[in-house]
Amino acid sequence: MKVINIVGARPNFMKMAPIIEAMNRHPEHFDQILVHTGQHYDERMSKAFFEDLAMPRPDIDLEVGSGTHAEQTARIMVAFEKVCLEKRPDLVIVVGDVNSTMACTITAKKLGIKVAHVEAGLRSRDMNMPEEINRLCTDVLCDYLFTTDRLADENLAKEGVAKDKIYFVGNVMIDTLIKHRAMAEKLTLRPKLGLEKRAYATMTLHRPSNVDHRNILKGIFEALHEISRDLPIVFPIHPRTRKMADETGLGHFFSSGVPVKGLWVTEPLGYLEFLHLNMNARMIFTDSGGLQEESTVLGIPCITLRQNTERPITCTEGTNELVGNDKEQILEAAGLILRNGSPKGRTPEKWDGKAAERIVRVLIDRMVDHNG
Ligand code: UD1
């Protein structure tokens, strides 16, 4: 079976890596082509992850770069259509919910090519999130929907997706975390920064709803600044956030000319370095989807700067709390954890490091055995 695997943006790499590896264990069944759309292109947003995760280099780079949603999506579709016409794959595999995920799904389906979506069925019910639109469009079109939890199965069934297309396989992002945990533990970045275990926080921030409005971004930076007086914070800053901060006159919060005690703002970190810092943090501040899941498995309290999540299992079973982006509420949530300790959570069902193998088994069973 000829398979095209799609990656485009940072959170795709750690989801695709274990799938490629699992298919490599069955070379008699899979002929793989890796396509990078180029949605993310900076060394630290893309290439560094291939090295950390020991992923093969992409066979094809569409080099679409940044743009408005329509521009980026359209550029991916035009470029990917040519690849599909030339390579004629039996299956395209997409992961997550970024523009590359949706664009490649639409393109392949219109050419009659089967598509598998890994991480299907997640719903925030927030149509202001571009990712929610990407998730809905992708899931309605796909032939194989691989889910991370049972609620995702229910979401899909309620939307009319046939049950025999839905497979609850677990979480491929956690496959990657489990594989790299011991390696990350051995790194020396934390002691080099002078950070004691459980005596610092980490932070990521990039959602348009948090960073594209000056007042909201300012409130978050002020909260961060205040918390960092008691608890040092490591903040690898996303290019989008840095750009918005600079453009709106908030760069002074972290410009090198004005050192802020306890706040270490750095370029985006590699996968292993960031896992290394997260696994021993006192708490994690984030608006990312993946970090809500990773913190749940690591058992580290996660303060999510959003009003909703497409991953509610991280709140009901894990260590995640939805706090929103109001300065006072962020301060209160952090203060509670500092005073009262961490909430206890448990690892969700099938987040056990074997999700990619389950996906590959389904594909062999459904596509190879049925055809052969
Ligand atoms: C994208 C995804 C988001 C995901 C995030 C992870 C969509 C709609 N959004 O958001 O779901 O959580 O990636 O990081 O697909 N930029 C660079 N260098 C890069 C890439 C981007 O400087 O390598 C800057 C550019 O100014 C660009 C901006 O970041 O315009 C936004 O990039 P884009 O890919 O549009 O969305 P993200 O915010 O990264």
Image: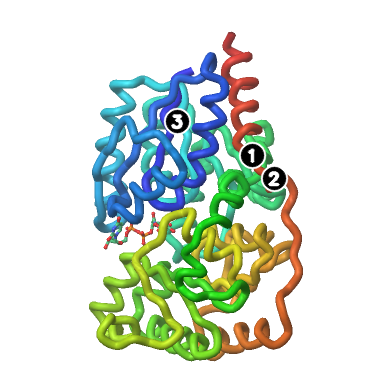
Q: Residue at x 31, y 49 (%)?
A: 39
To which quarter of the image does residue 102 belong?
top left
Residues under numbered marks 2 and 3 in contact, where contact means CB atoms less than 8 Å apart: no
**Which residue carries the number 1 mark?**
355
Judge depth for marks 2 and 3 and give the one in front: 2
Q: Is residue 80 among the parts visible in the rendering?
A: yes
Q: Quadrant holding ligand 1?
A: bottom left
Q: Which amino acid lies under the numbered mark 1 shown in the image of this protein? A: Ala
Task: From the viewer's perspective, tell me whether residue 257 is left or right of residue 119.
Answer: left
In the depicted view, which residue is nearer to us: 38 or 198? 198
To which quarter of the image does residue 82 belong?
top left
Rounded to the nearest angstrom, the CA distance separating label 2 from label 3 is 25 Å
Residues under numbered marks 1 and 2 in contact, where contact means CB atoms less than 8 Å apart: yes
Q: Which amino acid lies under the numbered mark 2 shown in the image of this protein? A: Asp
Q: Secondary structure at mark 1?
A: helix
Classify mark 1: residues with Cα within 10 Å, few (<14), some (14-19) or many (20+).
many
Judge depth for marks 3 and 1 and give the one in front: 1
Q: Which mark is residue 92?
A: 3
Rounded to the nearest angstrom, the CA distance separating label 3 from label 1 is 18 Å
* Mark before the other along the chain sequence, 2 or 3: 3
* Mark before the other along the chain sequence, 3 or 1: 3
Residue 18 in percent (x, y) is at 54, 38
Q: Secondary structure at mark 2?
A: loop
**Which residue carries the number 2 mark?**
352
Q: Residue at x 33, y 86 (%)?
A: 259
The reply to whether the residue tagged 2 has its Cβ within 8 angstroms of ligand 1 is no
